[in-house]
């Protein structure tokens, strides 16, 4: 049974079998699933995960900076905390977002359009 692309992506598991590891390292996809042999080279999430992470993290850290300034905390603390939150959230969210987008591409067999697709 094919696992949910959202669960497989969030867990970093193969979108085909749900057992093998999706990532070879932090953000580098494995070439193949070690459990079922699925070829991961067919799909590529590209810049999609970064775009979604920017949207989500921006919606969190922009209000955070305003709140910290409204509390009359020292400027260096407000800016430092916001930068730290930005970096931490981006690093934490990139792998699950990339995993989900890759798994969705896998499920829907998304690929670059070819000349044959237009005919
Ligand atoms: Zn697999």
Image: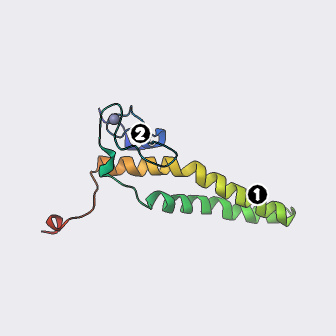
Left or right of residue 82: residue 118:
left
Name the image quarter holding residue 15: top left
* Residue that badge 1 annotates: 81
Q: Quadrant of residue 13?
A: top left
Work out which residue is located at the far left of the displayed protein and give it.
119
- Seen from the viewer's position, the closer of residues 45 and 29 is 29
Pick the residue in front: 31 or 48: 31
Which of the two discs, 1 and 2, labels the residue nearer the N terminus? Answer: 2
The spot of residue 84 in percent (x, y) is: 71, 56
Q: Which mark is residue 112?
A: none
Q: Nearer the viewer, residue 61 or 31?
A: 31
Instruction: Give the alpha-carbon distance from disc 1 to disc 2, as whole Å.
Output: 32 Å
Classify residue 69 as left or right of residue 95: right
Q: Residues within 10 Å of mark 2 (few under 14, many from 20)?
A: many
Residue found at x 37% / y 38% = 14
Above or below 17: residue 105? below
Quadrant where the C terminus is found in the figure:
bottom left
State whether residue 38 is above or below residue 56. Answer: above
Number of marks drawn: 2
> What secondary structure is marked by label 1?
helix
Q: Residue at x 44, y 60 (%)?
A: 48
Q: Ligand 1 is in which quadrant of the figure?
A: top left
Colouring mode (rainbow / by chain / secondary structure / one colour) = rainbow
Numbered tag placed on residue 8 in the rendering:
2
Indicate yes or no: mark 1 CB to ligand 1 under 8 Å.
no
Mark 1, Cα crowd under 10 Å, few <14 / some 14-19 / many 20+, is some
Residue at the image position 61 percent from the left and 62 percent from the top = 59
Q: Residue at x 49, y 63 (%)?
A: 51
Quadrant of res 1: top left
């Amino acid at each position: 049974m094919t696992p949910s692309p959202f669960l497989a992506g969030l867990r970093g598991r193969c979108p085909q079998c749900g057992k093998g590891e999706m990532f070879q390292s932090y953000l580098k996809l494995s070439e193949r699933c070690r459990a079922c042999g699925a070829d991961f080279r067919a799909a590529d999430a590209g810049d999609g995960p970064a775009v979604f992470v920017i949207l989500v993290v921006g919606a969190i850290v922009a209000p955070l900076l305003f709140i910290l300034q409204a509390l009359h905390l020292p400027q260096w603390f407000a800016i430092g905390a916001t930068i730290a939150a930005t970096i931490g959230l981006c690093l934490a969210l990139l792998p699950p977002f990339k995993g989900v987008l890759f798994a969705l591409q896998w499920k829907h067999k998304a690929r670059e359009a070819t000349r044959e697709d237009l005919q």
